[in-house]
Amino acid sequence: MTMPTASGKPAMSLRFRTTLLVIAAIVAILGTATLVIDIRVDNEVAQRADANLLERAQALADIFTTQTKASTQPFPSYWIPSFLADDGTVYFRIDCRGQHVVSSDQAAQLAWPAPAQGQSIAFADLSDRQRTDLRAIALRFSADANLAPGGTADTSECVLGLAVDRSEVVDFQQSMDRIEFGCVVLGLLAVAVLTPLLVMRSLRPLSGLAEAMEKIGPDTPSMRLASTNIRELAPLITHFNQVLSRMEEGLQRERQFASGVAHELRTPLAELRTAIEVELRYPSDRDTRELLIDIGDIGAKMERMVTALLLLTRIEAGIEQLSLQHVDVSALTQALIERHRHRLQERALKLEAHIEPGVTWMADPALLDVVLGNLLGNAFTYAPSGSTVELRCTALDWCVSNPAPDLTGEDVTRMKQRFWRKGKEAGVHTGLGLALAASAARAQSLRMELVLRDGNLQASVLATPT
């Protein structure tokens, strides 16, 4: 029924708890209903017995009235009408004008009820010397010619008392109580047996759900729980599948980050290792400071790669928070040109820049720097040496174009993928630059386009000017 939890406290079985609650609720409802029914049945039986007793008393009063009218003889105390001559005990008594007229044997020893002022009927429970349970009625009636003491006729008001054995009524009520109690016991036994089975059957989908959850793990990140038509479980399965989807996305991002780090750092690590091994085997006359500067440049390059990977992962995960503000795109473009000036000189590239002054966009400064900087750096890196790079910055768009003789239209559609490489012979490799720029642009609701036109790769960023 119970099992220990992580906190050490015993955990109650949901099946056992549900069974107890259902049984307790049924017992309470069934017990209350049985009690109400028993009270109603007892009251109905008692009312019908009183109604029957009233009819018998009225019949006896009518017989008494008829007898006194038809005969001057007193009503015999020993005579009992046939409808009263049953197997039970019967007592009757008749008083007129407060005077005793006639009664059966031992009737005087009973504590007869008396009708209240203004009422004609009164009921009471009595017992005789033999401790027999009796039900008595006192009925007030009028007789046109009643016999007063001494046999003289008189018109007066009379009171008739009639008491009968109520053991049959009590026995019937007790029989009904036993029947009701037996039905309740049988019902409770049926509930105690069927409830655990029904609860077990109703909770069977939970067991199947637990078994399905056990099969989901790090080795099966794409597995999902099957949908169900059970209303209570459907939201749970939906939310759990959503959690699994987020976990799978996080796992994929971690794997992408790890593969990206391994891919991007392979070349600078090889450069670093080669530089150190060459210097150790074939010492040169280079100054130690210059050697350390070269090693520091390689380390800075690796740091930028790791930072770019982290930024790309955070942008795709929606973790990077945007800080939208007015950004001077013209000034940012000039700063980017100065940042890449050394690459222009190293590769003998010619830059034709057309920058309108005062161009401002609503964007995140850091992310916009990532977008424009990567596009400009990609153009300076992969343009053929000695070629011309065109740059245009207007209020409508920002565009950089460079010759790309080795690219095709199909290549351009793949350039936004991580670490895309055209081929070992072509040497075209975008790394993370365009993938990072595309993600950063998408995060700022900017539109980045790559188009191959007349042998030139044209990278554009479109935004609503402010």
Image (cartoon, helix red, strand yellow):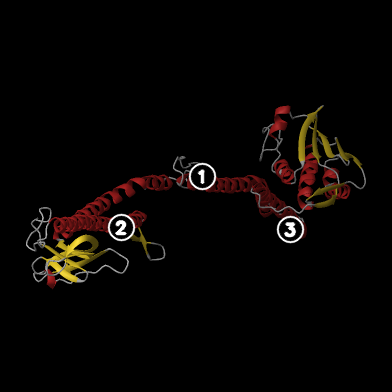
Amino acid at pointer 3: Leu
Labelled pair 1, 3 in contact (Cβ < 8 Å): no
Q: Is mark 3 on a helix, strand or loop?
A: helix
Amino acid at pointer 2: Val
| In the image: residue 415, left or right of residue 84 | right
* Front in this rendered view, residue 422 or 242: 242
Q: Residues within 10 Å of mark 2 (few under 14, many from 20)?
A: few
Q: Sequence order check: which comes first, mark 2 or mark 3?
A: 2
| In the image: residue 255, left or right of residue 335 | left
Q: Sequence order check: which comes first, mark 1 or mark 3?
A: 1
Q: Return the residue at label 2.
A: 36
Q: Can residue 177 be seen here?
A: no
* Front in this rendered view, residue 61 or 51: 61
On residue 292, the disc is 3
On residue 380, the disc is none
Q: In this view, does 328 lie above or below 459?
A: below
Q: Return the residue at label 1.
A: 238
Question: Residue sitting at 10 percent across and 53 percent down?
Answer: 82
Labelled pair 1, 2 in contact (Cβ < 8 Å): no
